[in-house]
Amino acid sequence: MDDYPALAMHVDGEWLGTEGRRTHSVVNPATGQVLAELPLADAADLDRALDAAARGFTTWRHTPAEDRARVLKTAAALLRERAEHVATVATTEQGKTIHETRIEVHMAAGALEWAGEEARRLYGRVLVRPTGMRSIVVKEPVGPVAAFAPWNFPIGNPGRKLSAALGAGCSVVLKPPEEAPASALEVLRALLDAGLPPGVAQVVFGVPDEVSRHLLASPVIRKMSFTGSTAVGKHLMKLCADGMKRTTLELGGHAPVVVFDDVDVDKVLDAVVPAKFRNAGQVCVSPTRFYVQRGIYDEFVEGFTRRAAQLPVGNGLDEANRMGPMANPRRVEAMGRFIEDAESHGAKRTTGGDRLAADGFFWEPTVLADVPLSARVMNEEPFGPLALMAPFDTFDDAVQNANRLPYALAAYAYTDSAKRAMLIGDALEAGMVGINTERLGAADAPFGGVKESGHGAEDGPEGVEACLVTKAIHQS
Ligand code: NAD
């Protein structure tokens, strides 16, 4: 990409560049080539961001809801106008295909628009007492939010975090991923061009642990929102405990897919194979453990394998490709380790399993059949293009296997029986369940997990609600 944007932080209405700061090299994962240098915040930058967020909160919480709504909805329209540019930036720095990043622009725009509309519906309630006394329950923005967005949805996730906080009337210090920073800056630019006042949204980059420790130690920050691994989520929640800060944590997943033997196998495969290899499997709700009823197991594995082997893999900017590289070399190394371990436990590789001979961080779409529960990959989130297959016999066996892990973000089931659909929807432990669909996200529906996949939800009324506190005013 010739016009990959210059990278800077944004604090108190000012752009802060690389001069005099440590830097991080942003790499194109499809080629391994350096795209640009990213400035990293030092302690003084972070203090400045905190001061600005404190002042920005005063400005924004007192901005009429109609005006907040206008900014968010105008930003959504600007993002849509700029969709092709923003999608190209995201594919260049993160790797996923241009088809996916185009959708992601609309995901961010949808979140901004929804939160803008929701900003006008932050109702309280009045309780009228017989004595003439009244109790008034009001919703107030929680305060400045520290938000940490990961590299796998570099447009959509910052869009989600900014929209909820700004819709509720909070200011924000956002740390997008250092690996894919320009996408989040495009979302910020749309908000600034739409009239967001200075100091309301700061964007900083840095050494993640330094930034989170610094921001979360400050009394200015009243809420933290994080998307990433369970291990880091637990660490950040502990940091928040000291200041009793509210948390929204969207952490890892290991989604089971229960496929009953009454389905049209080809139809299910047409849906789940592209879903598995979306973003090279680096998706928290990626369908991962395929539990397939024994009568159709062989047919399902064979059909999955054939489709996976035919998937066009390559640079995501090429319209013909359906899977891009992995976002970073860490994921490539992790794939090799997971597959070796699974094979040593008896899993059968039916396709893939190797790095692709290319300059970037490409890994073949891989299918492992008959994967035993003892394999590491059946217990740890692979976060890559690995589909794991195992047969089951009864409904209860499927549910037991599906629910056996501490992860409980997404779960899926495919059946043609209305009764089974209802029973499995109730039985699966997850924050989100897809029955005969692999589509779980929508601007108006909550997105989040339970158990060790985190707590709280983003999107929908729940996302905005998570940035509000209630106050009861009793008046006689
Ligand atoms: P990681 O655990 O090092 O980092 C995960 C994310 O957390 C990254 O965006 C990183 O910048 C951020 N992070 C790490 N330490 C942090 C800290 N102390 N303070 C603030 N932010 C911090 O792992 P990784 O190699 O980048 O990603 C691999 C794993 O992360 C995957 O196995 C997956 O479980 C998880 N992940 C999940 C999601 C999701 O959508 N839930 C997204 C990205 C990564």
Image (tube, rainbow, N blue to C red):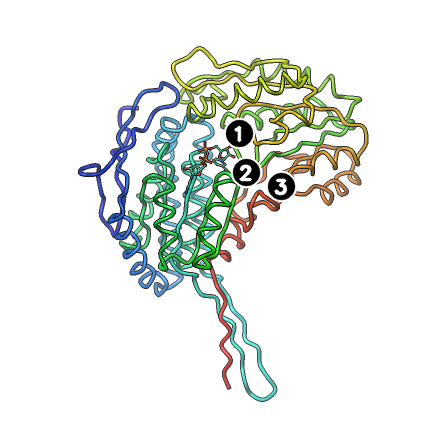
Determine which of the numbered discs, if any, sits on residue 252 in the image. 2
Q: Are marks 1 and 2 in contact (CB under 8 Å)?
A: yes
Q: What residue type is labelled 1?
A: Phe
Front in this rendered view, residue 338 or 316 = 338
Element assignment for label 1:
loop
Front in this rendered view, residue 69 or 176 = 176
User: Which of the two discs, 3 and 1, labels the residue nearer the N terminus?
Assistant: 1
Badge 1: residue crowd in 10 Å (few <14, some 14–19, many ≥20): many
Q: Residue at x 55, y 46 (%)?
A: 454
Q: Can you name the residue that lies furthest to the bottom here? A: 131
Element assignment for label 3:
strand
Mark 1 CB within 8 Å of ligand 1: yes
Residue identified by numbered label 1: 383
Q: What residue type is labelled 2?
A: Gly
Residue 52: image quadrant is bottom left
**Residue 224: horizontal and vertical position, in percent?**
44, 52
Residue identified by numbered label 3: 408
* Left or right, residue 317 beside residue 366: left
Badge 2: residue crowd in 10 Å (few <14, some 14–19, many ≥20): many
**Residue 320: horizontal and vertical position, in percent?**
46, 17
**Residue 464: horizontal and vertical position, in percent?**
48, 55
Residue 442: image quadrant is top right
User: Which of the two discs, 3 and 2, labels the residue nearer the N terminus?
Assistant: 2
Q: Which amino acid does label 3 sit on?
A: Ala
